[in-house]
Image: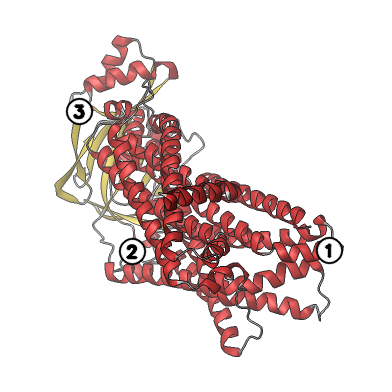
């Protein structure tokens, strides 16, 4: 009983003494609990169940919760490691005064139990409040109107308690093993052990430094060519992707481990021994810690870059929803006269004002190989019997009033970014139409991305020809005609009413595949708004989950960098004390520290941005039509988050420097 009271008193005194250190650890725990609980509870929120459903959305949220658990585990265990490093001298002193290792382990375990269950209570309360915000964001993404109430889930609470109880056991076990295995001297001197410094670079280390830079550059080059050859086999494509990953990850490690230290060593030598206090606090400190920090900086940089790339891809899909819908359905509504679908009459009955466009689309067998930029490379795989979509100049004159064509001339529409990645063509060349009269050449005057017509063919572009030649093709037995009616609403405020009419009357039709008499495609008679909403429905959950996990991971990695800087600041407090006694001011010391901070946060930031840019650049066309705006917005959020952690870290350093004297 006496021992129990003594242990309890030690726990309370220890917690009071370490209150300044505990806030960092408590923040990590509360943040992790609230993040996990708020995400898990989404599966049981009535608004999501009613508006999105419980099938695919529930499975997606459950799968994402495992990824979030990985992030939380990584974050909490790393924070615990840093926290224990800061308390290593205290633990050593406990043993020095006669406490056994098992008693010290029990002391730390009781402290952890108190902290963890307090954090779980606070984190669940915070998560309960933030979960409503996350539900509102999700419904906003998919454009669903629903009242979102504060929803408490017993299931989510039980899952959170179980997960963090298991993590607590792991942390206690991790701490006990460390106390048992580490010697008393090692515990007392943990924070005093300097990281190894590379004093002299040999030829091999210099070579590895250059290899790191070259590896990253070559990995970037491969990423820009990954979609150049459409005939590549899956095994070759997989090999290229693995090679890019290996080159960038390995190159990043070599850059942090050798290249940076090599460059800084050259800079130091160029000073010829005349180093200022700023140089000592920045260059020397970075070089001292580079070996220990290389792996952690590489891990944070690569994982952050991957997260940023995924965030950008998903945001491209969301940002491009409007433009993709406009490309797929160029008019507000598209119908086909031969289906008996009387949408026009229904609009007239309801008083919906619109402009009607009657268009004849012809499927014409053609040889497009002469248009290819790399004809020699693709010539063997492009059939001469594939068809193109042909329209008359008159049908699109209202959209392109300044376009003029002579018989024998053509103009290509709809050659967008995705088409450009699949098949590269250029103007001022001729293609051959295969008609009943034989092969006829059409000279292509210009290629444009204007998408004014629906596309239901292989290549993704439409050929506009002169009216006289179109009439000739219209009566050719080798061509197939499809009549299309496009309707544009005159007033946007009638869209809701028009959608109700459309939903009550929409049907599907069979569209022939050009060049194949036996095959057809089933095409829904669509509206642009319906296409856009369906796209948001299918992508909304993916966009939300990717954004949630991405931002959670970015915050976690930024916090880890911040925690590391706090630990380093505490370890270097003795150095600042000596400098202050020598007469250096806080601002003079901080100027050197800011240089170090610029490297610790800025260098991984720059490399992470470069990695993610080339990853996105290599495959963004598969996710949408817009690149620049989503890329800049996502990277802007990334930079702002890391800047916040950098500013907080600099503020902590200033406090340590001011308290050093």
From the viewer's side, name the closer residue of 439 and 34: 34
From the viewer's side, name the closer residue of 359 and 125: 125
Q: Name the residue under label 1.
A: 581
Circles 1 and 3, Cβ within 8 Å, touching? The answer is no
Q: Name the residue under label 3.
A: 507
| Residue 318 percent coordinates (x, y) | 42, 40
Within 10 Å of the Cα at label 1, are there few (<14), some (14-19), or many (20+) other Cα atoms? few
Q: Name the residue under label 2.
A: 230
C-alpha gap between disc 1 and disc 3:
84 Å
534 relative position to 171: left or right: left
Q: Is mark 3 on a helix, strand or loop?
A: loop
505 relative position to 232: left or right: left
| Residue 641 percent coordinates (x, y) | 57, 47
| Residue 366 percent coordinates (x, y) | 28, 54
Closest to the camera, between mark 1 and mark 3, is 1
Closest to the camera, between mark 2 and mark 1, is 1
Exactly how many numbered labels are in the figure?
Answer: 3
538 relative position to 23: left or right: left
Q: In this view, which residue lies farthest toward the left?
A: 518
Residue 235 appears in the picture as rendered: yes
C-alpha gap between disc 3 and disc 2:
35 Å
Residue 306 lies in what quarter of the image? bottom left
Q: What element carries label 2?
A: loop
| Residue 288 percent coordinates (x, y) | 64, 74
Residue at 59% over, 49% down: 17
Within 10 Å of the Cα at label 2, are there few (<14), some (14-19), or many (20+) other Cα atoms? few
Residue at 63% over, 78% down: 197
Within 10 Å of the Cα at label 3, are there few (<14), some (14-19), or many (20+) other Cα atoms? some
């Amino acid at each position: 009983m006496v021992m129990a009271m003594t242990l309890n008193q030690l726990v309370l005194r220890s917690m009071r003494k370490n209150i300044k250190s505990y806030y960092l650890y408590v923040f990590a725990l509360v943040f992790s609990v609230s993040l996990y609980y708020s995400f898990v509870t989404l599966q049981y929120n009535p608004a999501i169940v009613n508006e999105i459903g419980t099938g695919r959305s529930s499975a997606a949220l459950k799968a994402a919760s495992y990824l979030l658990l990985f992030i939380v585990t990584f974050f909490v265990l790393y924070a615990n490691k840093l926290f224990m490093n800061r308390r290593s001298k205290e633990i050593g002193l406990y043993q020095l005064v006669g406490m056994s290792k098992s008693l010290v382990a029990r002391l730390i375990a009781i402290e952890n139990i108190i902290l963890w269950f307090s954090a779980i209570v606070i984190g669940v309360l915070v998560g309960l409040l933030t979960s409503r915000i996350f539900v509102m964001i999700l419904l906003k993404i998919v454009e669903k109107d629903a009242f979102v109430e504060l929803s408490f889930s017993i299931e989510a609470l039980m899952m959170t308690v179980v997960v963090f109880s298991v993590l607590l056991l792991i942390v206690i076990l991790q701490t006990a093993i460390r106390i048992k295995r580490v010697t008393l001297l090692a515990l007392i001197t943990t924070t005093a052990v300097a990281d190894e410094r590379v004093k002299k670079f040999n030829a091999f280390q210099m070579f590895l430094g250059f290899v790191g830079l070259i590896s990253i550059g070559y990995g970037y080059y491969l990423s820009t060519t990954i979609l150049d050859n459409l005939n590549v086999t899956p095994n070759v494509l997989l090999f290229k992707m693995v090679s890019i990953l290996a080159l960038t990850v390995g190159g990043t490690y070599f850059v942090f481990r050798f290249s940076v230290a090599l460059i800084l060593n050259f800079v130091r030598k160029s000073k010829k021994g005349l180093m200022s206090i700023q140089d000592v606090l920045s260059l020397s400190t970075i070089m001292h810690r580079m070996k220990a920090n290389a792996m952690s900086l590489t891990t944070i940089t690569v994982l952050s870059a991957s997260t940023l790339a995924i965030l950008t891809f998903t945001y491209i899909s969301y940002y491009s929803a409007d433009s993709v819908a406009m490309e797929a359905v160029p008019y507000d509504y598209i119908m086909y006269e031969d289906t008996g679908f009387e949408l026009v009459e229904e609009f007239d009955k309801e008083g919906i004002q619109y402009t009607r466009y009657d268009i004849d689309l012809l499927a014409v067998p053609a040889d497009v190989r002469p248009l290819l930029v790399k004809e020699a490379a693709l010539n063997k795989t492009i059939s001469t019997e594939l068809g193109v979509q042909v329209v008359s100049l008159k049908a699109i004159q209202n959209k392109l009033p300044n376009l003029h064509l002579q018989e024998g001339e053509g103009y290509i529409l709809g050659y967008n970014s995705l088409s450009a990645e699949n098949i590269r063509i250029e103007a001022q060349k001729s293609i051959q139409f295969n008609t009943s009269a034989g092969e006829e050449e059409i000279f292509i005057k210009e290629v444009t991305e204007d998408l004014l017509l629906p596309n239901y063919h292989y290549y993704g572009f439409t050929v506009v020809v002169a009216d006289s030649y179109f009439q000739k093709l219209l009566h050719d037995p080798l061509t197939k005609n499809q009549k299309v009616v496009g309707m544009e609403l005159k007033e946007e405020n009638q869209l809701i009413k028009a959608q109700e009419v459309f939903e009550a009357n929409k049907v599907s039709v069979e569209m022939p595949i050009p060049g194949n008499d036996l095959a057809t495609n089933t095409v829904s008679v669509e509206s642009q708004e319906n296409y856009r909403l369906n796209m948001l429905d299918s992508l909304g959950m993916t966009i939300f989950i990717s954004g949630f996990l991405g931002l959670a991971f970015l915050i976690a990695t930024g916090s880890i960098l911040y925690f590391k800087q706090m630990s380093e600041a505490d370890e270097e407090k003795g150095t600042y004390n000596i400098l202050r006694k020598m007469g250096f001011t806080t601002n003079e010391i901080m100027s050197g520290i800011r240089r170090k901070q610029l490297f610790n946060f800025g260098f991984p930031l720059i490399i992470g941005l470069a990695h993610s840019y080339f990853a996105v650049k290599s495959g963004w066309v598969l996710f949408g039509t817009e690149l620049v705006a989503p890329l800049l917005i996502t990277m802007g959020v990334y930079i702002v988050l890391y800047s916040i952690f950098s500013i907080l870290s600099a503020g902590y350093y200033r406090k340590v420097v001011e308290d050093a004297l």
